[in-house]
């Protein structure tokens, strides 16, 4: 029986494939499926993290890329992602069906572990494992609801379609599911986080390096901070962000001096950025993905890229709150420009290739990225403090971010006055007259003047900090930022299309995979 069911992970509880779901229900796939001791349950949690990533899909949907034209390579899948079309192409490892199935497979592993822990009587030896499973389950659903649904909205989330929140192991063949609302999904996420985070114990992992691939305390708190930021719970966002780095940011600063020793090779620099020895990396995630080539110094599929127009006027090489970019002084420490692919790059993604046949040189492309970092948590705290009008605290965090992110040793001191001067020096962005200041259309109230300008500054920093890593799309959604597609050559804007993503545009909720819709789950409205 080859038909996929809505809950694709049913046939992959511990990451195995079977030709028959019925056969799966009749036989144990291996000894890990019989979860009857602490070691087996702990090992199962390795598979409680998605093996495919949202990065390519959400980065191509964001305003970090332009169309360099048909002289550069693309395929139907990247064209659909860039154009906010329903994604029907399923080739490769970066399509929406891979996001869907890998997240639900990870959720299934977490649920299987939780069921086994409960059946064993919740022994103290599995307390930390239970905490990790709850947080991992929340994370899988958080990815799904933010990719496949509208952004959390106090006014609309009680009726907006979310995704199905799975709270138990599946034991039925061909079960039928309905979609929870976005609000219901977030309520479940908060329940799992509040129950799971206190149970996590970093000492339960073999060593600190192993912990970087699991929800350790720092990663779990940074995740909770992001959830509350997305919901508009500003005080909670500050609390959890502070907890992620134990409120001592000086001990978590990334060693850019060491990373810089690899500057001769962008791929080596990117690999070092994601090193598990770096304390600023809270959670490191390997994935089957071409993210490292699309957003690295390669010409593969280089039609839709983070190019010079975006960089010069909006991001890496533009005029930011700290000053104007220069090649010899004021610039990002892990910045690179690839002349062969016309990409302006930041070393956030590492490309690796796994050879399954060294002779034929065939195998799988992997991307390694860090979905939760100290830097992003610090800027989460800054943004939440701006919303609370705690400007002094926000300025301190933004200043500190700048001191270790830029090369210059003479970084100016940020103040409310000079941020206002910076923001007021720009008109609002238009596709033909781009600036770093884009019109913000959130559902919450922003005061004109200092508060709005401070938000422009922190969103600029967040855009750099999450550059090519897929998170800009979620900032676009939560602030109602409109995007109009355009074609560019270098820094020159050639033409502007009529394809504009408007506020609350239905396409902000990426369409469900086609086979999931065919199996009966309600699609997103179009």
Image (cartoon, rainbow, N blue to C red):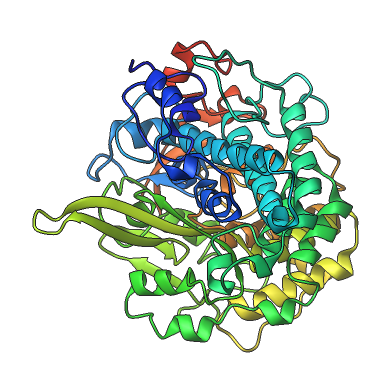
Residue 403: x and y, percent?
66, 80
Return the residue nearer the eye: 444 or 498.
Answer: 444
Task: Give the percent coordinates (x, y) of residue 81.
Answer: 42, 34
- Please provide percent x and percent y for residue 379: 71, 62
Q: Nearer the viewer, residue 319 or 239?
A: 239
Residue 354, compared with residue 211, is above or below; it is above
Q: Is residue 404 left or right of residue 362?
A: right
In the image, taking residue 239 as reference, residue 472 lies left or right, namely: left
Q: Quadrant of the N terminus?
A: top left
Residue 40 lies, with reference to residue 162, above or below; the image says below
Task: Pick the residue in front: 435 or 277.
Answer: 277
Residue 40 location, x and y as percent?
Answer: 53, 51
The answer to whether residue 420 is seen in the rendering is no
| Count of number-bearing discs | 0
The quadrant of the picture occupied by the C terminus is top right
Residue shown at 52% from the left, 77% from the top? 277
| In the image, residue 408 above or below residue 120 | below
């Amino acid at each position: 029986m080859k038909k996929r069911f809505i809950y694709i992970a049913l046939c992959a509880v511990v990451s195995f494939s079977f030709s028959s779901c019925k056969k799966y229900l009749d036989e144990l796939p291996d000894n890990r499926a019989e979860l009857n001791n602490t070691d087996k349950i702990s090992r199962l949690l390795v598979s409680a993290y998605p093996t495919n990533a949202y990065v390519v899909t959400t980065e191509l949907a964001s305003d970090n890329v332009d169309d360099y034209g048909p002289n550069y390579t693309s395929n139907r899948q990247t064209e659909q992602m860039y154009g906010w079309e329903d994604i029907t192409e399923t080739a490769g490892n970066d399509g929406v069906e891979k996001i869907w199935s890998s997240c639900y497979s990870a959720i299934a592993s977490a649920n299987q572990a939780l069921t086994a822990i409960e059946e064993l009587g919740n022994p103290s030896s599995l307390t930390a494992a239970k905490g990790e499973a709850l947080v991992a389950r929340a994370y899988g659903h958080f990815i799904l609801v933010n990719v496949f649904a509208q952004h959390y909205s106090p006014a609309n989330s009680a009726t907006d379609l979310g995704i199905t929140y799975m709270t138990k192991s599946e034991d039925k063949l061909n079960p039928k599911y309905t979609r929870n609302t976005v609000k219901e999904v977030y309520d479940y996420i908060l329940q799992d986080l509040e129950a799971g985070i206190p149970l996590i114990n970093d000492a339960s992992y073999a060593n600190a390096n192993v912990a970087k691939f699991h929800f350790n305390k720092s990663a779990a708190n940074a995740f909770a901070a992001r959830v509350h930021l997305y919901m508009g719970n500003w005080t909670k966002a500050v609390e959890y962000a502070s907890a992620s780095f134990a409120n001592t940011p000086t001990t978590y600063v990334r060693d850019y001096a060491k990373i810089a020793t690899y500057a001769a090779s962008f791929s080596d620099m990117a690999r070092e950025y994601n090193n598990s020895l770096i304390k600023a990396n809270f959670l490191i995630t390997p994935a089957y993905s071409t993210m490292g080539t699309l957003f690295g110094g390669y010409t593969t599929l280089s039609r839709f890229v983070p190019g010079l127009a975006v960089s010069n006027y909006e991001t890496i090489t533009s005029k930011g709150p700290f000053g104007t970019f220069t090649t010899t002084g004021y610039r990002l420490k892990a910045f690179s420009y690839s002349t062969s692919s016309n990409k302006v790059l930041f070393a956030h993604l590492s490309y690796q290739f796994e050879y399954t046949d060294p002779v034929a040189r065939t195998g799988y492309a992997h991307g390694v990225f860090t979905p939760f970092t100290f830097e992003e948590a610090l800027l989460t705290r800054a943004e939440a403090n701006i919303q609370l009008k705690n400007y002094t605290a926000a300025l301190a965090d933004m200043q500190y971010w700048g001191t270790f992110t830029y090369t210059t040793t003479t970084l100016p001191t940020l103040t409310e006055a000079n941020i206002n001067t910076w923001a007021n020096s720009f008109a609002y962005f238009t596709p033909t007259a781009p600036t770093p200041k884009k019109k913000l259309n959130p559902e919450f109230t922003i005061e004109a003047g200092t508060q709005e300008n401070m938000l422009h500054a922190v969103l600029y920093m967040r855009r750099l900090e999450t550059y090519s890593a897929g998170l800009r799309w979620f900032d676009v959604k939560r602030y109602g930022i409109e995007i109009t597609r355009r074609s560019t050559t270098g820094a020159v804007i050639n033409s502007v299309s009529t394809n504009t993503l408007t506020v609350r545009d239905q396409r902000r909720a990426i369409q469900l995979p086609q086979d999931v819709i065919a199996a009966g789950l309600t699609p997103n409205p179009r």
